[in-house]
Amino acid sequence: MLLTDGVHLVSDFCLEELHFFAQQIGLKREWFQDHPRHPHYDLTSKQMKWRVRFMLGVTVSSKELVRRCFRSRWNVEKAKEESDD
């Protein structure tokens, strides 16, 4: 699922979903911020925020956004891979 707190755009499912949606609303791939536990795009203009809210419709608090990122399926899988190394 794609989520926003009005400032960040994240996926709690997979990066492919995030990149695909970002491209659809006009975000450039080089704007992607690859943080280890919460990779995201910043929404820096009113137009981008409006597009995300109009197309996505799922806005959560910043606290909820981070909580969902940490509990996401792909973060659990990433942590498991790191522990196997």
Image: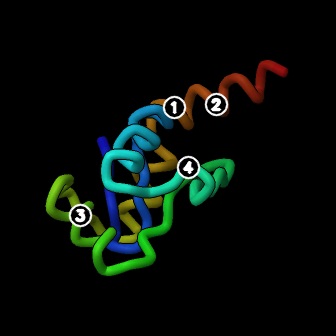
**Which quadrant holds residue 45?**
bottom left
Which residue matches tag 1?
A: 74
Q: Is residue 2 left or right of residue 35?
A: left
Cα distance in 3D space between marks 4 and 1: 20 Å
Q: Around disc 1, counting alpha carbons within 10 Å, would you say few (fewer than 14), some (14 to 19), or many (20 or more)? A: some
Which residue matches tag 3?
A: 51
Q: In the rendering, which numbered label is found on residue 29? A: 4
Which residue matches tag 2?
A: 78
Cα distance in 3D space between marks 1 and 2: 6 Å
Residue at image position (20%, 57%) is: 58
Cα distance in 3D space between marks 3 and 2: 30 Å
User: What amino acid is found at the position of numbered circle 4 in the picture?
Assistant: Arg
Q: Around disc 2, counting alpha carbons within 10 Å, would you say few (fewer than 14), some (14 to 19), or many (20 or more)? A: few
Which element carries disc 2, helix, strand or loop? helix
Camera-nearest residue between 67 and 52 = 52
| Label 2 close to label 4 by CB (< 8 Å) | no
Q: Is residue 18 above or below residue 79?
A: below
Q: How is the image coloured?
A: rainbow
